Image: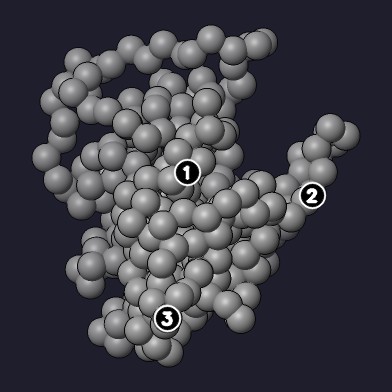
């Protein structure tokens, strides 16, 4: 049985993106069927929008675009795949596996992103599931690396710099894990986990059926360094230290440098510090601030 989602009251008609998420059966849509369709190397637009929540989206080879158009062929479709790597941390074993996968399934490149994670390019549809499973084999994933959810949580680049930096890196991982979507869709589609028989039992206690209106970014800085550009984040956390111990964070909100193209009511701005939060409460506070945007 598929759960019927009732959209919350709001002004005006729901956007097509909101309707798509509400009808997606918690990010499943028809992705599984589309990925098994051997008649095309692409997927429908609605499934491609859902694919972002799984850490990927469809592209095409630009170098072949004109020639394929001339021959009346479909574009040379391929996928970008982005990892979720809180604080940008990977073990040597994980890195070697990622390097192997770039050649095995991708176009031989590994791209380091501005949010401390890794992207693969050139993944063909027929190799996507195998690629995802091999990423999982070294305990990495791509959950929520794109889409209208909390994105990769950034912090200091070197957790071995001091005990303080290691503790802050661990907190970045805790925040990332806490704010993951709860749907089982990712595990069903890519990792062959048992399907949820009745999705009425499935809940998204943090995000709700519509998830967020847009992406959400969190970064943690350890003064005097500001290597994460903390005031450009939706939530910027600035470590506060007393007697060489982390006691909490000054919290800045409202960054992201975001504006909506063509909407004169929006403008880019830096985050503003609103107060101090003890480290024991910071995960819950991040959730509360993020869900204000959802509501």
Q: Residues within 10 Å of mark 3 (few under 14, many from 20)?
A: few
Q: Give the vertical position of 193 relative to 29 (above or below).
A: below
Q: Is residue 228 left or right of residue 136?
A: right
Q: Which of these two is toward me, 83 or 244? A: 244
Q: Give the vertical position of 44 relative to 6 (above or below).
A: below
Is residue 240 at all visible to an observer of this figure?
Answer: yes
Q: Position of residue 15 (x, y in %)?
A: 61, 21
Is residue 98 at all visible to an observer of this figure?
Answer: no
Residue identifier under label 2: 268
**Dot in front, 1 or 2:** 2
Q: Which of these two is toward me, 8 or 68? A: 8
Residue identifier under label 3: 243
Task: Give whichever of discs 1 and 2 has the lower sequence position.
Answer: 1
Judged from the image, the secondary structure of the residue bearing numbered disc 1 is loop
Task: Give whichever of discs 2 and 3 has the lower sequence position.
Answer: 3
Judged from the image, the secondary structure of the residue bearing numbered disc 2 is loop
């Amino acid at each position: 049985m598929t759960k019927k989602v009732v959209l919350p009251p709001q002004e005006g008609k729901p956007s097509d993106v909101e309707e798509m998420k509400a009808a997606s059966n918690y990010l499943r849509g028809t992705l599984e069927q589309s990925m098994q369709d051997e008649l095309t190397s692409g997927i429908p637009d609605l499934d491609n929008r859902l694919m972002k929540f799984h850490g990927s989206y469809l592209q095409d080879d630009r170098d072949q675009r004109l020639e394929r158009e001339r021959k009346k062929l479909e574009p040379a479709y391929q996928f970008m795949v982005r990892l979720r790597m809180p604080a940008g941390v990977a073990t040597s074993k994980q890195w070697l596996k990622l390097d192997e996968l770039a050649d095995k399934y991708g176009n031989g490149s590994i791209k380091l992103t501005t949010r401390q994670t890794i992207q693969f390019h050139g993944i063909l549809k027929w190799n996507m599931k195998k690629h995802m499973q091999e990423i999982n084999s070294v305990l990495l994933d791509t959950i929520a690396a794109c889409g209208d959810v909390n994105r990769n949580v950034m912090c200091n680049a070197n957790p071995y710099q001091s005990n303080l930096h290691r503790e802050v890196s661990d907190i970045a991982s805790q925040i990332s894990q806490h704010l993951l979507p709860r749907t089982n869709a990712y595990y069903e589609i890519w990792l062959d986990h048992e399907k949820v028989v009745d999705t009425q039992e499935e809940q998204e206690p943090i995000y709700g059926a519509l998830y967020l209106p847009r992406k959400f970014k969190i970064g943690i800085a350890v003064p005097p360094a500001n290597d994460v550009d903390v005031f450009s984040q939706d939530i910027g956390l600035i470590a506060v230290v007393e007697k060489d111990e982390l006691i909490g964070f000054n919290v800045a909100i409202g960054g992201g440098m975001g504006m909506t193209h063509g909407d004169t009511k929006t403008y880019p701005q830096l985050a503003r510090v609103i107060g101090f939060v003890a480290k024991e409460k910071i995960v819950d506070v991040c959730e509360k601030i993020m869900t204000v945007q959802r509501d």
